[in-house]
Amino acid sequence: MNDDARSTTERADTGAEVPVLVSFSRPKTMKEHLSLALREAILDGRIGPDRTLTEIALAKQFGVSRTPVREVLQELEHEGLLEPAGIRGKRVRRISPQEIRELFWIRLALEPPIAARVAEAGVREEDHALLRSLIREQEEAKARRDAYRFLIADSALHINLARLTGLPKVTEIITNLRNLFQIVGLTAIQRLGRLDEVVSEHLRILEAIERHDCRAAENAVRAHLRNTETIVMEQLRADRDY
């Protein structure tokens, strides 16, 4: 690994890669540069659902052939970040209110007991350090107004809490939902002051876990998710597209 790069993944019991840090290895190919650039632009809101992405336009913009552009667009669609738009275009996936309610229903069913289980079992020192480092990543991203890094750290925190249960299937479910977490999260953090609230809510979760207070950890996660759901649904009701 290069000196200026840190791994973003750890191998979970399922064999799947789980993000544990939010710093990235430097892309080495044009395809990797293109993938990172588009992913960042989607998750920080610079590319919204109203913009159609085409192979021709992106190839011209980045000065590359259409082949790597096509491959990256297909990968992002497979990951759930993009959806078809017309014959040859893609756009940021529009998540319906029904999908959002279902997503939060799943998260509210799984994540409060995840936190309670982790609080009861206790967390190793290195895992405490990891979770705290993700909070610091969010604080630094907040200071830089970097929505992309903020959301990556947010997903990593929730995924790693699932990993610490030692339950592979639960970890797999939470991991597979991470792209939806980030798209929905982007809507939530558009509200003024929400970044500060998220950091505070995450700190309350970690503090309860560190105290081995199962009930407080469970309640802190439930409050965090309900707050986020309320903000997202309010934003959608204010959006004329819905």
Image: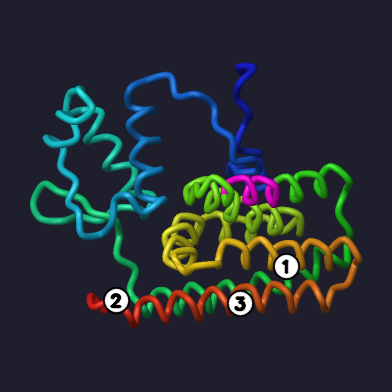
Q: Which residue is under mark 3?
A: 108
Query: Along the horizontal axis of the image, is 95 left or right of 129?
Result: left
Residue 70: image quadrant is: top left
Report the number of numbered marks. 3
When the figure is inspected, residue 202 is found, relative to residue 151, above or below; the finding is: below
C-alpha separation, residue under disc 1 versus residue under disc 2: 33 Å
**Mark 3, secondary structure of its residue:** helix
Residue 69: image quadrant is: top left
- The location of residue 168, given as percent across then percent down, is 67, 55
* In this view, the mark in front (1 or 2): 2
Q: Which residue is under mark 2?
A: 239
> What's the residue type where badge 2 is placed?
Asp
Query: Along the horizontal axis of the image, is 84 left or right of 134?
Result: left
State which tag comes first along the sequence, 3 or 2: 3
Question: Which residue: 64% across, 40% down?
Answer: 21
Residue 190: image quadrant is: bottom left
Question: Which residue: 50% across, 49% down?
Answer: 145
> What's the residue type where badge 3 is placed?
Leu
Quarter of the rendering occupied by the N terminus = top right
Q: Which residue is under mark 1?
A: 114
Question: Which residue: 29% across, 50% down?
Answer: 47
Asked if labels 3 and 1 touch by Cβ distance under 8 angstroms, the answer is no
Magenta range is 134-141
State which tag comes first along the sequence, 1 or 3: 3
> What's the residue type where badge 1 is placed?
Ile
- The location of residue 99, given as percent across then percent down, is 39, 74
Work out whether residue 149 or residue 217 is closer to the camera in this orientation and state it: 149
Quarter of the rendering occupied by the C terminus = bottom left
**Mark 2, secondary structure of its residue:** loop
Magenta-drawn stretch contains 124: no
**Mark 1, secondary structure of its residue:** helix
Residues packed near mark 2 inside 10 Å, few (<14), some (14 to 19) or many (20 plus): few
